[in-house]
Image (cartoon, grey):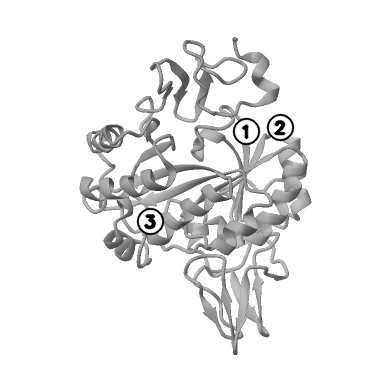
């Protein structure tokens, strides 16, 4: 039975820890290499994420086989906008996180430090995804790099069955983690916060700098993994256009002008209930700034019916029409090219649905 997202975690079961892959031994401690915190842990100590622990001189993943949230989502919810439009994606998370975002909408699982979840072996996750007609699996809701070994084992099996694998990530992976993910990862949505301002990251996330995230972009690109970028624009405390420009310049240098970028509307939650929703005008200014800098695919997220569609960068033809988390392929032929000018935007289409597209 699927443990749908939102069920009470106090109904869950506890699993046995599984020895991790991403760590090294240093004198009388271990160094975790799953995320850029590189936590050094003496025996009995647990990392910042709450799920990776030194047990008798080795690092163990405490949440292996213990998803805390499972759901089926449209791929647009991740958001992944330039791969498999309209796909059903089997989404899962564990408890814990490498960030401590004060506005997290999933704080009940991401900031939970009790090891709990619903027992699902990797094979069972893939079986469930296939039985529900999904085209892929997303590791999301909390930070997937902290349960990388579990994601890896699921993903390798999923890929054998023709499913794609997606990370929705804060981008704090290490080079070691990205190298380990090569075996299975197809796409990653990297979520910046507050225009990548170090001040914002220190004050509201408990992270000293956003710098490692740009390194992750480069490592993902080098690994041949499809990358999309989002930026949560937080009003009053994380919405300065000068910060956005600096962030966008660095993204352009690393990924080029064709990377999809979405500016997301903030909604008050958790410990930041005193702020308003991000004004649409603020999001529009961020959108227009990115367009003026030469980015070809710029979107606005969490504002239904506004800034969601994909247009051909060559002729302006409407390629994909979206509303909230639904999409309709309008201007692409069965081979994924613009019907009007023949341009290839390199947006993979689901093979089983290509016959539905008008050539």
- The numbered mark, 3 or 1, whose residue comes first in the sequence reads 1
Q: Is residue 311 left or right of residue 61?
A: left
Label 2 CA crowd tier, 10 Å (few <14, some 14–19, many 20+): few
Q: Which mark is residue 58?
A: none
In the foreground, 228 or 76: 228
Q: Which residue is mark 3?
A: 270
CA distance for labels 3 and 1:
29 Å
In the foreground, 57 or 175: 175
Q: Which residue is mark 2?
A: 133
Q: Could you tell me which residue is drawn at 61 percent across and 26 percent down? A: 349
Residue 350 image offset from top left, x and y in percent: 65, 26
Q: Do callouts 1 and 2 mark residues in contact (Cβ within 8 Å)? A: yes
Query: Mark 3 against mark 1, which lies toward the viewer?
Result: 1
CA distance for labels 2 and 3:
34 Å
Label 1 sits on a secondary structure element that is: strand
Residue 157 image offset from top left, x and y in percent: 76, 48
Specify whether residue 95 is in view. no
Q: Could you tell me which residue is drawn at 78 percent across and 50 percent down? A: 123
In the foreground, 105 or 330: 330
Q: Is residue 92 left or right of residue 37?
A: right
Vertical order, 2 against 149 (above or below): above
Q: Which residue is mark 1?
A: 88
Specify whether residue 126 is in view. yes
Residue 151 image offset from top left, x and y in percent: 66, 55
- The numbered mark, 2 or 3, whose residue comes first in the sequence reads 2
Label 3 sits on a secondary structure element that is: loop
Of all residues, the one furthest to the bottom in this rendering is 28
Residue 231 image offset from top left, x and y in percent: 37, 45
- The numbered mark, 1 or 2, whose residue comes first in the sequence reads 1
């Amino acid at each position: 039975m699927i443990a749908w997202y939102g069920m009470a975690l106090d109904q869950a079961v506890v699993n046995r820890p599984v020895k991790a892959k991403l760590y090294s031994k240093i004198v009388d401690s271990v160094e975790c290499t799953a995320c850029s915190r590189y936590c050094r842990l003496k025996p009995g100590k647990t990392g910042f994420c709450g799920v990776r622990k030194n047990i008798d001189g080795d690092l163990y993943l405490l949440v292996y086989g213990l998803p805390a949230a499972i759901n089926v989502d449209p791929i647009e919810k991740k958001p992944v906008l330039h791969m498999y439009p309209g796909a059903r994606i089997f989404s899962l998370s564990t408890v814990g996180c490498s960030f401590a975002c004060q506005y997290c909408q999933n704080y009940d699982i991401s900031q939970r430090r009790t090891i709990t979840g619903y027992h699902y072996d990797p094979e069972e996750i893939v079986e469930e995804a296939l039985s529900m007609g999904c085209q892929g699996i997303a590791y999301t809701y909390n930070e997937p790099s902290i349960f990388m070994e579990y994601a890896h084992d699921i993903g390798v099996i999923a890929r054998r069955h023709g499913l794609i694998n997606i990370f929705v990530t804060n981008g704090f992976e290490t080079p070691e983690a990205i190298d380990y993910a090569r075996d299975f990862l197809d796409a990653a949505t990297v979520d910046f916060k507050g225009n990548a301002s170090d001040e914002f990251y220190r004050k509201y996330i408990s992270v000293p700098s956003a710098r490692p995230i740009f390194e992750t972009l480069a490592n993902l690109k080098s690994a041949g993994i499809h990358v999309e970028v989002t930026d949560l624009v937080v009003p009053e405390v994380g919405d300065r256009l000068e910060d956005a420009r600096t962030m966008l310049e660095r993204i352009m240098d690393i990924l080029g002008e064709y990377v999809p970028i979405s500016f997301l509307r903030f909604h008050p939650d958790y410990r930041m209930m005193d702020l308003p929703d991000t004004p649409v005008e603020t999001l529009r200014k961020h959108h227009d700034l990115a367009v003026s800098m030469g980015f070809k695919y710029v979107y606005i997220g969490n504002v239904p019916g506004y800034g969601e569609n994909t247009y051909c960068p060559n002729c302006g033809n409407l390629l994909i029409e979206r509303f909230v988390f639904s999409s309709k392929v309008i201007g692409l032929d069965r081979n994924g090219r613009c019907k009007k000018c023949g341009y290839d935007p390199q947006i993979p289409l689901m093979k089983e649905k290509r016959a539905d597209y008008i050539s």
